[in-house]
Image (tube, rainbow, N blue to C red):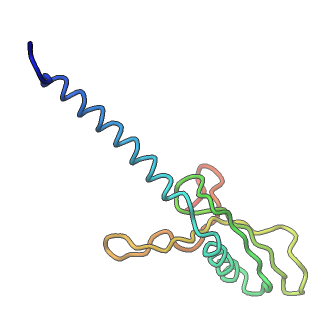
Amino acid sequence: MNKGFTLVELLIVVAVVGILSLVGLTLVGGLVGSNVDGDAAATNMTQYVQDLYPEYTSIRASCTNADTDGDGYVRCTATALDSKGVRITTPLTAECTGNISTNAWGVFVNEGCAPIKHGAGYGR
């Protein structure tokens, strides 16, 4: 009687463990990147609206905390008073990030806001 495992059995175990590890890391990586600081994103949205419409005052922005498409941006909306002091009737929308990070070269990535993508040919 042989005691121990054959090479084929060991390779199968290593392959299964590798596949399970890859799936686990992918799921954990997706969960880590899916939350964005909504308050920081709202601050970015306020600045974005102020840059686009300098005449607007009393800007109020709110953002979701969930990054549903995994690009690091969340959906934000803002309302404001126009130059005559009248509240704008259609809220402004954009995708903003609350994450401020740098890549390996020290370049800032995923910062600020961008128009919402509306299908092919639009977006960042």
From this viewpoint, which residue is outermost toward the top?
1
At x 48% / y 52%, what residue is drawn? 30
Residue 7 vertical position relative to residue 114 in the rendered view, above or below:
above
Q: Camera-side residue: 9 or 78? A: 9
Residue 98 vertical position relative to residue 75 in the rendered view, above or below:
below
- Where residue 1 sits in the image (x, y, percent)? 8, 12
Residue 1 vertical position relative to residue 5 in the rendered view, above or below:
above
At x 29% / y 36%, what residue is drawn? 17
At x 31% / y 74%, what residue is drawn? 105
- Where residue 31 sits in the image (x, y, percent)? 51, 53
Total labels drawn? 0
Viewed as shown, does residue 82 lie left or right of 5? right
Residue 91 vertical position relative to residue 31 in the rendered view, above or below:
below
At x 36% / y 37%, what residue is drawn? 20
To which quarter of the image does residue 13 belong?
A: top left
Viewed as shown, does residue 123 lie left or right of 108? right
Q: Camera-side residue: 88 or 67? A: 67
- Where residue 112 sits in the image (x, y, percent)? 56, 74
- Where residue 55 sits in the image (x, y, percent)? 77, 87
Q: In which quarter of the image is the C terminus?
A: bottom right
To which quarter of the image does residue 83 belong?
A: bottom right
Q: Camera-side residue: 97 or 15? A: 15
